[in-house]
Amino acid sequence: MTLEKWLQQHELKVSDYDLVRRAFTHASYVNESKTTLKDNERLEFIGDAVLQLWSAAFLYRQTPELNEGQMTLLRAQLVNESALASFGKQLDFSEVLLLGAGEKKNGGMERDSIIADAFEAFIGALYLDGSMENVNLILEKTITVAYDTLDKVDLMDYKTTLQEFMQSDTRKTVTYELVSSKGPSNNPTFDSLVTMDGIILGRGSGPTKKKSQQAAAKDALEKLVK
């Protein structure tokens, strides 16, 4: 499918087709071909900033009002890698994404990291093309719908929320370490740490290992969203 037809299907009118095409051009395609196209990595940077601001303003307008911590945690769920990849798949990015042959063979068309990066780049391209109307159109189809279907109970799953929060900016994984267990076997207390890159993010205790990890994640989140 041509880019022009794909844009028409999504009711998007753009001025700079080359800029939008760049959003869908993976580095592997540039490296393997003799194209004059540039890859989408710089556009990802712009798109990430637009997504952060747009989602923050969207959450700010919700009623009843959300507090700062709730907005931070919800934004982490709405713009993490998994969410952005699902948006790209929803919009049929595979129809216009340009990958090198090797990357295609290795399943790149379905890889969350590649699709999420392309989604960021796409939003960045629409913004630089000068049309917030286009940005709003796409994000209302994706982020707004995702928010309406979001299970808000997930906010109490502190481990999941912490991981999503950290990945929204760093895409790194947090790890948990059991540091001690004490008390009788019928009433034990477990102490856990949650860390990233050797830095302690939070500490927690509980009657089970899982609950001590949840407590550690909750402690980390409370520190991070202050």
Image: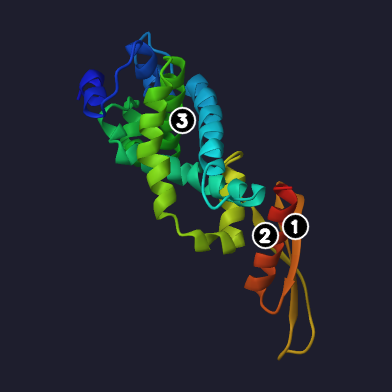
Q: Which residue is mark 2?
A: 217
95 w.r.t. 222: above or below: above
Mark 3 lies on residue: 120
Residue type highlighted by circle 2: Ala
Q: Residue pushed farthest front?
A: 64
The residues tagged by marks 3 and 2 sit, at their Cα atoms, a distance apart of 28 Å
x, y (%) of residue 98? 32, 24
- At horizontal 32% and vertical 13% (from top left) the residue drawn is 17
Specify whether 185 is left or right of 131.
right
- Above or below residue 201? Residue 133 is above
Q: Is residue 114 left or right of residue 191?
A: left
Which residue occupies 68% across, 54% down? Answer: 221
The N terminus appears in which quarter of the rendering?
top left
Give whichever of 183, 102 is nearer the camera.
183
Label 2, residues with CA under 10 Å away: few <14, some 14-19, many ≥20: many
Three-letter code for the amino acid on which mark 1 is drawn: Gly
Label 3 sits on what residue type?
Glu
Name the secondary structure under disc 2.
helix
> Disc 1 marks which residue?
202
Q: Mark 1 to mark 2: distance in Å? A: 6 Å
Q: Are marks 1 and 2 in contact (CB under 8 Å)?
A: yes
Lower sequence index among marks 1 and 2: 1
Question: CA gap, disc 3 to disc 1?
Answer: 30 Å
Binning the other alpha carbons within 10 Å of mark 3 as few (below 14), some (14 to 19) or many (20 upward) gives many
Please identify the quarter of the rendering in which residue 92 is found.
top left
Pointer 3 or 1: first along the chain: 3
Under tag 3, what secondary structure? Answer: helix
Report if the CB atoms under discs 3 and 1 are less than 8 Å apart: no
Is residue 24 something one can see in this rendering? yes
Q: Position of residue 66 (x, y in %)?
A: 59, 50
